[in-house]
Amino acid sequence: MRFAYDVKYDQIAGGPKWMASGSYDLRAKAAGPAEGPELRLMLQTLLADRFKLAIHRETKTVQGYALVAARSGLKIKQVDGAGPPSMKSYRGVIAAKATPLARLARNLTITLRTPVVDATGVPGAFDFKLEWTPGVISSEEPVSAEIGPSLFTAMQDQLGLKLEARKAPLETIVVDRAEKLVVD
């Protein structure tokens, strides 16, 4: 369900108790190759067919962050449609090419494990590389000069962006019905 609906565990609510404890190895064959959104839709259909899964979406407000421009202004420059957007994340680094700031916000949601919304109001795409000390998130955490910057400090210093604590919308998937798959 997490992959099919592009959500994390804490964004799934409801459903029978067996959903949290059981796992299944499902096999299916597509008529042709599929990627990304098309593959997710195919998996949603498979879950509805095999488990009689019925869901609805709800949005709840939770504590999160807003991605905003720092007072000093953006330190990254817009790029003119130079190829498809790409973003790579690895321990303490986010490298992006032709990427909108909304995608950075989605990536930060994963990194911080809390919702981050793009509140910059800045359209367009950017190339950038953000580097921080892995495991050091906020500027309140003690960091020595030899270790490197926190994520919050690096964002301001390297990108001219900052994260402000705010209430943020979080879309959730609520399971209305699911039937346990009977295996012979």
Image (tube, grey):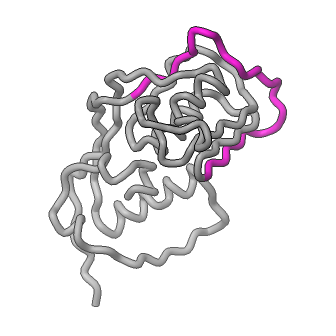
Q: Give x and y (percent) for residue 111.
A: 48, 44
Q: Residue furthest bottom?
A: 184
Please identify the quadrant where the C terminus is shown.
bottom left
- Residue ID at (23%, 65%): 20
Left or right of 64 on screen, residue 157: right
Front residue of 94/84: it is 94
Q: Residue furthest top?
A: 71
Front residue of 139/41: it is 139
Q: Which residues are magenta?
A: 65-90
In this rendering, is residue 87 above or below 39? Answer: above
Front residue of 180/121: it is 121
- Residue ID at (65%, 36%): 130
Queried whether the magenta region covers residue 68, the answer comes back as yes
Q: Quadrant of residue 48?
A: bottom left
Q: Give x and y (percent) for residue 157.
A: 63, 24
- Residue ID at (71%, 39%): 96
In this rendering, is residue 93 above or below 79? Answer: below
Left or right of 151 on screen, residue 65: left
Left or right of 183 on screen, residue 93: right
Please identify the quadrant where the N terminus is shown.
bottom left
In this rendering, is residue 42 above or below 122? Answer: below
- Residue ID at (62%, 42%): 146
